[in-house]
Amino acid sequence: MAKDAETSKPKHLDPTSEYYLSSQANSGNSLTKDTLKGDNYVAWEQSAILTLKSHNELAFIDGRITKPDPKSEDFFAWDIVNSTLCSWICNSLDPPIRATVSRLNEARLIWNSLKTRYSIPNRPRIYKLWSDASMTTQGGASVMTYYMKLLGMWDELLTLSPLESCGCPKGLPDGLQTNAIKIGSVSLADDITLRHVLYVPNLAVNLIYVSCLATDANCFMAFSYDICVLQDRTSKSPIGLGKMHRGVFVFQPLSTATVAAVSESESYELWHRRMGHPFSQPLIHLPTVSVVSPSLKTICDVCCRAKHTRTVFPDSTNRAMDIFGLIHCDIWGPYRVTTISGAKYFLTIVDDYSRAVWVHLMHDKGQTGTLLRNFCNMVHTQFGKLVKIIRSDNGMNLIPSP
Ligand SMILES: [Zn+2]
């Protein structure tokens, strides 16, 4: 009778059953002390897994115990444990997050839903951790506090971007086999990142397959008896170098430098500008200049502008007292390109009082007189004014050509 009573014990109360739920576990508990707010998923998950392990309920979350058939005798016990776990998880979530999983009635589904949303590589968080770790200073804290703070950041970084596990045997150059335990990426130089790099604890040197390097660095490689050069496939610039040492090419990154082409013919003009436009005598003492003829092939525009002796025109203080009391006119041209209408000159008229400007295009200078007469008529008609004085720089321009 006693044996029968023992076997009829509900599975969730039987310590030997996988559905056993300890008497201390009740649905009012929370899975973790700190609630999940989204950005603290990593810490929340670690704490939650510890709690689940301590209650021996992790199998419900990681899929080792699946939902039994509702008609089976296990379903009742599973349902009790599942409901308790659902309650634990939901009690450890921030209310807005809890609302998003309220329709899920299976602990494993809730867990996976949270994991899918919050454990994806969180690049802003990774960037912030990198920034914080690089900016963290000891300040007034003790070495131990400072160390623990940094350790926390590195741990979270490692969790956010974990190395993929790899347990497959790999052949070594000496013919032996060993196991690579991790696989990840390694930055070889600024522009070269090797992917799927295997970490073999027993291997004391870093070996690179030439084929992998050519693929990942997208480069050409040229080998000679003592050197191996890596060239960028597009720019053809060298990006890496391998120097022979004891029968092995040892990789060395190259810092890229861009050099502008300099021809000897430009050397004198270039150094003339660099040295602040001196005359030719000091420049011929420069080794790069002495090999070429010490004379400017073209006239230096800066020298002409900067070294002329005439003083600038003083600012005029005279101004006409009334509109159209004085107008200035000037003719410019001929320009080497004509307009669509065939004009090569233009006549500029400036009112001295208002500084208003009128510009007229002209085929030849002979049109000047007509345009000026028309302008005076326009002023009289439009503004009721008379042009009193017309001033120009050179009266010859205004004389109509024969
Ligand atoms: Zn100059």
Image (cartoon, helix red, strand yellow):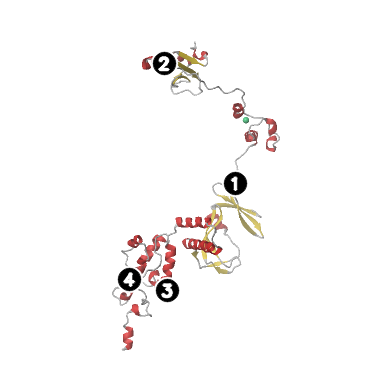
| Identity, as a three-letter code, of the amino acid under mark 2 | Phe
Q: Residue at x 51, y 15 (%)?
A: 397
Residues at discs 3 and 4 in contact (Cβ within 8 Å):
no
Q: Is mark 2 within 8 Å of ligand 1?
A: no
Residue 276 vs 214, above or below: the answer is above
Q: What mark, if any, has residue 257 been given in the picture?
A: 1
Can residue 81 be seen by looking at this rendering? yes
User: What is the secondary structure assignment of the residue under circle 1?
Assistant: loop
Closer to the eye: label 3 or 2 = 3
Total numbered circles: 4
- Disc 3 from disc 4: Cα separation: 18 Å
Residues at discs 1 and 2 in contact (Cβ within 8 Å):
no
- Residue 391 percent location from the top left of the image: 49, 15
Tell me the quadrant of the picture where the N terminus can be found: bottom left
- Disc 2 from disc 4: Cα separation: 97 Å
| Identity, as a three-letter code, of the amino acid under mark 4 | Ser
Q: What mark, if any, has residue 375 been given in the picture?
A: 2
User: What is the secondary structure assignment of the residue under circle 2?
Assistant: helix
Report the residue marked by disc 4: 83
- Disc 3 from disc 2: Cα separation: 101 Å
**How many other residues sit within 10 Å of disc 4, few (<14), some (14-19) or many (≥20)?**
some
Residue 313 vs 9, above or below: the answer is above
Can residue 109 be seen by looking at this rendering? no
Q: Residue at x 59, y 69 (%)?
A: 176
- Between 15 and 131, the residue placed more toward the observer is 131
Q: Which residue sits furthest front?
A: 140
